[in-house]
Image (tube, rainbow, N blue to C red):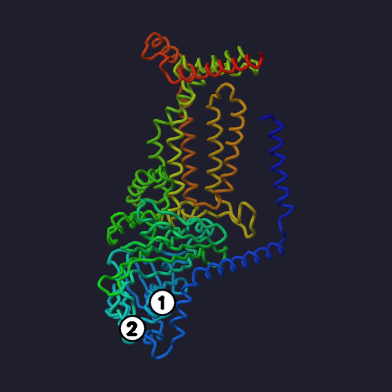
Amino acid sequence: MDKRTYYGFLLIGLAIILMFFLNKPNKEQAAKQQQYAARQDSIRMAEFENDTTAVIEADTMNVTNAVDTLSPFFPSLTGTDEIYTISNSHVKVGISSKGGIPCRVELNDYKNQQGGNVIIFDQSEISLNIRIDGKDRNISTGDLYFIPTDVTGRSITMRMLTQGYGSLDFHYELDPESYMVNLDIRANGMSDLLPSNLSNLSVEWIQNLRQQEKGFEFEQRYTTLTYKRGDKNNAKKLMVSGNPRIINSEEPLEWVAFKNQFFSTILISSAGFDANARLAAASYQKGNGYLKKMSATLVTAFDPRGNEPTRLQFYLGPNDYKILRSANSLVHEGSRIRLQKVMDLGWPIVREFNRFLIIPLFNLLSRWGLNMGIVILLLTVIIKAIVQPFTYKSFISSAKMRALKPYVDEVNAMYPKPEDAMKKQQETMAVYSKYGVSPMGGCLPTLIQTPIWMAFFFFVPNAIELRQQSFLWAADLTGFDDIIHWSSNIPLIGNHLSIFCLLFCASNVINTVISMKQQQQAPGQEDAMKTMKWMMYLMPVIFFFSFNNYSSGLCYYYFISALANIIIMMYLRRTTNEAELLKQLQANYEANRNDPKKSRSNSMMARLEAMQKEQERLRQLQNKQKGK
């Protein structure tokens, strides 16, 4: 690109910025916009609830409208809403007598932002209805009252009584050392009420997911409705942005999770959930304490005779990779259940780097009892040491190209005309080929390090071990550091500056300068190199606006990673003598020129050179044909 193009981009950018500030609303307009957004949010949520709860409300009316002594549900139509607690050392689960459902989950090992125990949900934030189709009347348990029986510290049976038609039992049992709750649903003597050919029941589940962390936008991004299909290894997410989204799954499901950034409610069925499960989610606006609203309507096996219970399980706990993996062994018939898939560790190759490199190293270093900032530092050093051979190879490849620059300059002087660009490129490639240097030699280390760079991007927001862990000025490595903050909101920045983000961007600029200096551009690629340099210097600016609200632990890792790159490059530049390197290249050429096994005719560079010559021959032939 020429100077006019750059000036054009600059003027466009300035025009966009000017238009942004000219159209920036004043305080009164901003307040109206916020009120409008809140109204739209309420409308979307109302539409969402109307769609997802219509079946529940219709079935409830069938039951509650028949409040008379002749109703088969009369013993369960009235009662007192009481909460019964089952617990172990990790979790307390409240079971409500109304609906017989889990209505409160409190975690003993994790603290909220106010210093109390984390509450995954309470009674006002969850609705769980079991729907069973009867002969004349459907059972909809959401507004029926259950009575407790067989109560112990870790188990309870909630029983729904009928009038002469048997009972329905919900038996809950909390595992003694985990976050797993077993739920067995069994019909007792209900053959007169339920058809003999009935084979399933429906679970209608709605939940508001509360904000648990400091940064709303960052936590909301990692709050997802996640589900695993029965014949697949990986989980899928229902992506929501703005408007509510509703889908029907085309395949049977093993489990469905309403997942916060660090805590999840996962519902599992030992028989699996049938295809066409209805899943829905919608996002809340910032400020009301909730991130998203989620809904699932699921169908699973049910025996109306009561010979076999419907076996459901809840995982009510942290998104901790080790804990989730260990919970797999507690799942009924769950050899492929893979609850750890609720954590999004990236695309396939990135996920494998996380599974087999980042997470094992992180767990090993975490056992030493070090500050988590030191753990990230040591982890970075270890990874840099692992990829150092590739980094060195990339640097030497670039150094060889710089050492051959005098020969390349001679070629450039021989072909100064633009129409000789192809010939100049061929001759330059011939020089590289002659001395066994490949312009592509520096690409491999970048390809190796990119999945690791991306692995951290997915790992840190999922690492609950970093939650509420402080380091230097960052109070929480999973949230942004904001010791520099102000009251008003600045567009694209917010109300704070993240120091780790600034350090990351600054180190990225320095790293780019060093990287650009060591690159030897290929012939004919001058304009492309200018464009690449322009883009490389623009990236830190983009990073700043993108990462200012991101995890301080992630920005800290990228900062020390870039700093390590700077130190490594400076050391390699100081210890590499390009004049001696050129002598070595010349000596190798003289030693191998008569060796057919090492001659350039067998090298990839020679093949590339031959391809370029063939392209040039075809171009000249086309020109001759046009001349005729």
Helix, strand or loop at mark 2? strand
Q: Which residue is mark 1?
A: 140
Helix, strand or loop at mark 1? strand
Measured from the top left, where is residue 373 in percent x and y? 43, 49
Residue 475 at least partly seen: no
Q: Which mark is residue 465?
A: none
How far apart are the two marked residues, 2 and 1, measured between alpha carbons?
A: 13 Å
Q: Nearer the viewer, residue 288 or 189?
A: 189
Measured from the top left, where is residue 43 in percent x and y? 60, 68
Figure check: 226 above or below 545: below
Figure check: 509 above or below 209: above
Q: Nearer the viewer, residue 96 or 206?
A: 206
Q: Which mark is residue 161?
A: 2
The residue type indicated by label 1 comes to: Ser
Q: Nearer the viewer, residue 24 or 77?
A: 77
Q: Residue at x 47, y 28 (%)?
A: 442
Q: Residue at x 40, y 40 (%)?
A: 381
The residue type indicated by label 2 comes to: Leu
N-term-proximal mark, 2 vs 1: 1
Residue 510: image quadrant is top right
Q: Residue furthest top?
A: 594
Answer with left or right where residue 63 lies relative to residue 409: left
